[in-house]
Amino acid sequence: MAVAPLVVTIGDPNGIGIEIISKAWMQRDLNNLPVFFLLGNVKTIEHYLKSTGIAVPFLEIASPADAANVFSKALPVLSLEGSNSVAEEIILSIRRGTEYCLSGEASALVTNPIQKKRLYDTGFSFPGHTEYLASLTGVTDQAVMMLACRELKVIPATIHVPLNKVPALLSADLLTHVISTAHRDLNYRFGIANPRIVVAGLNPHAGEDGSIGTEEVDIISPAIKNLQQSGMDVKGPFPADSLFHKAARGKYDAAICMYHDQALISIKTIDFDGGVNITLGLPIIRTSPDHGTAEDIHGKGIANPTSLIEAMKIAAEIASIAND
């Protein structure tokens, strides 16, 4: 049976999404990319390419199944109808892409970056892609964000919240959910039979037995012990400043971090261009480049497509494991 194509959302047209998907298609053979199609308004795409001088051929398709027939000669584009603004186009692209994955017409969803404030200004009530996708797919538990490159996988327990709110948000229930979700998807999505998971502390030196903060003693350690009793290979909490060097990375499959920057600084230092955002806990496969819309270089033709290309590769790898 033929593998369904990847569906790539347009992202914010005021950013670099159309540019990097165009470059990814032009580098498809070099990177051995699977068949994919872009979901967006044809007029928006055409205007962007003309205004920036990017010479990539594209052909409109009527359904995801048509992508394979045109992929070798042009970027397949499935046009969106019914959007009256940039924000509506962004949201509709995400929703339709999710629907194609749920129906099996697409094997995985790869989302281009969005400018969240532009959506918030129109009444969009979700903090970002992760929460919106959970709602679209009927997931009631918190979806989990993982950042991955070839050398490291990190998972922040809290995501887009002010740093001063992190301690109050941490709980044994939250950590249990995040670690359990990571364990399940590392096994199911990545084919790791018994995932080795480590957990970072919140405070310097992982709290030093409560002398530099008590979250490790009161919250993090009890959650880890309960999960260990269930049979999971989970260790910690460890000082975050010694968790990400090369020798340490070889001892685990994923690291759970307590807040956004604790996770993202490590992976962006190791592989700034190749990091990928992966949503765990969904019934569909979703990946995304680990960068923003980069509106400051919109239309300049200098955007680097590496992270998007890696997002496609990882999405295809996960899809192949799920189909085995």
Image (cartoon, helix red, strand yellow):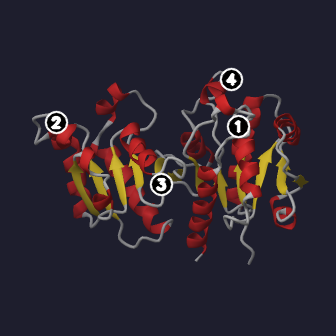
Category of crowding for the residue at label 1, using alpha-carbon neighbours closer than 10 angstroms: few (below 14), some (14–19), many (at least 20)? many
- Picture quarter containing residue 174? top left
- Picture quarter containing residue 1? bottom right
Residue 129 locus on image (x, y percent) = 59, 41
On screen, 6 above or below 138? below
Closer to us: 140 or 192: 192
**In this view, the mark in front (4 or 3):** 3
Residue denoted by label 1: 91
Q: Are marks 1 and 3 in contact (CB under 8 Å)?
A: no
Q: Earlier in the sequence, mark 1 or mark 4?
A: 1
Alpha carbon distance from label 1 to label 3: 25 Å
Q: Earlier in the sequence, mark 2 or mark 1?
A: 1
Residue 36 locus on image (x, y percent) = 74, 59
SS category of the residue bearing label 2: loop
Q: Earlier in the sequence, mark 1 or mark 3?
A: 1
Decide if residue 284 is in sight here.
no
SS category of the residue bearing label 1: helix
**In this view, the mark in front (1 or 3):** 3
Residue drawn at x 83%, y 65% is 72
Alpha carbon distance from label 2 to label 3: 29 Å
Closer to us: 187 or 136: 187
Q: Identify residue type, mark 3.
A: Ala
Residue denoted by label 4: 122
Residue denoted by label 2: 214
Q: Earlier in the sequence, mark 2 or mark 3?
A: 3
Residue 213 locus on image (x, y percent) = 17, 33
